[in-house]
Amino acid sequence: MDADAMIAVFMREQERGVELADAATNLEELEAARTAVLGRKAPFAEAQKQLGSLGEDERRRVGQVANEARRALQATFDDRRAAFEAQAEDALLASDGVDLSLPGRRPRPGSLHPLTLVEHEVVDTFVRLGFRVVEGPEIEDDWHNFQALNIPPDHPARTMKDSLYVAIPGHPELLLRTETSAAQIRTMQAQQPPIYIVSPGRVYRRETSDATHLAVFHQVECLVVDDGITFADLKGTLEVMARSLFGANRRVRLGPAYFPFVEPGAEVGVSCFRCDGVGCRVCGNGWIELLGAGMVHPQVLENCGYDSERYTGFAFGMGIERVAMLKYGIPDMRMLLEGDVRFLRQFQGVA
Ligand SMILES: [Zn+2]
């Protein structure tokens, strides 16, 4: 092949390359065209290989033509490739429905769960009063969960707290605690009075979930044991808590109730924070039943090695779910577990 023949190949291939690049309708076709024109076995490369057979001057002249043609071809294919890629990106953006002219999305800050908010509020109230926060194990033995609290094995109170037992060989008495009260027993066993503790945590009952019941829920319990603790101390403490949770004007009322671990025991109601005790859809008669309370039963004190002639105390336990439902107007307890972001995001900025 002489010099002119080579130049003819380079020019022809350049022209053919531009035609093929123009004809390509997608990236795959474009790549095939590029290989056909600029590949190692294409006519262009074959002709270029023969440059060596030319004399020095001709080789330089023809080589320059070859280089320019190759550069131009490369640029043609690059431009065409860029156009296809831009097209693909546009198509992707269009199919994603992304509008780049829209302002950016503000990252949404997380928020505490309503149960956590209520637990913090209760615990903070007691910490301000000088109480200590204690937590206990969620798997308990029968003695700490029932017997120490004056609930022997045949006690009818057990049937109201259907328990979930844990199958650990050799430990038939282990169960998921039904109250956080066991943490109070453990605290009393570990130290002498004075005791001023609050004990939040998760408890378990064999319940079918419905709008007002869950098998796993949360309680916060309070225990005071000291010299000369009276029912008035209980009522005063309940008032502080009720006002902290539901507003400064709340009143507290106590009605007689039976719980095995207190004597006397009381159902505690708080005047409605919606209607201030007049009566409304939330409360019915102006009062919201909030929790159970009472003076610690002397037998419970004795069970823990305290002298019940010397010490007295009070205790109460409250459901955190119930308080959250009241405070935030949540109609169904199960909403607290569903993890629905539309529900949870309403608590942003609360706290
Ligand atoms: Zn009301």
Image (cartoon, helix red, strand yellow):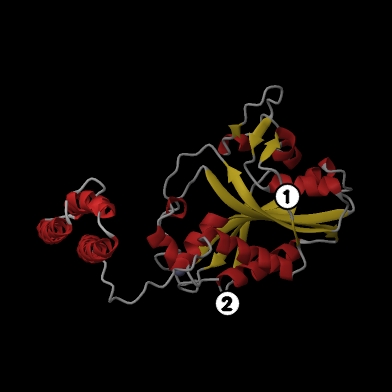
Quadrant in which ligand 1 is drawn: bottom left
Give whichever of 208, 229 is nearer the camera: 208
* Image point (58%, 69%), residue name: 245
Q: Is mark 1 within 8 Å of ligand 1?
A: no
Residue 219 horizontal side relative to residue 93, left or right: right
Residue projecting furthest to the top: 170
Quadrant position of residue 316: bottom right
Residue 163 visible within the image: yes
Q: Where 302 falls versus 30 (above or below)?
A: above
| Residues tagged 1 and 2 counted as in contact (Cβ below 8 A) | no
Q: Earlier in the sequence, mark 1 or mark 2?
A: 2
Quadrant position of residue 104: bottom left
Residue 297 visible within the image: no
Residue 103 horizontal side relative to residue 87, left or right: right
- Per the image, the residue denoted by label 2 is 249
Secondary structure under the numbered disc 2 in the rendered image: loop
Task: Bin the neighbour count of mark 2 within 10 Å (Cα to Cα): few under 14, some 14-19, many 20 and up.
Answer: few
Give whichever of 210, 344 is nearer the camera: 344
In x, y percent, where is residue 184? 75, 49
In x, y percent, where is residue 243? 61, 72
Residue 22 horizontal side relative to residue 174, left or right: left
Q: Is mark 2 within 8 Å of ligand 1?
A: no
Q: Where 336 falls versus 175 (above or below)?
A: below
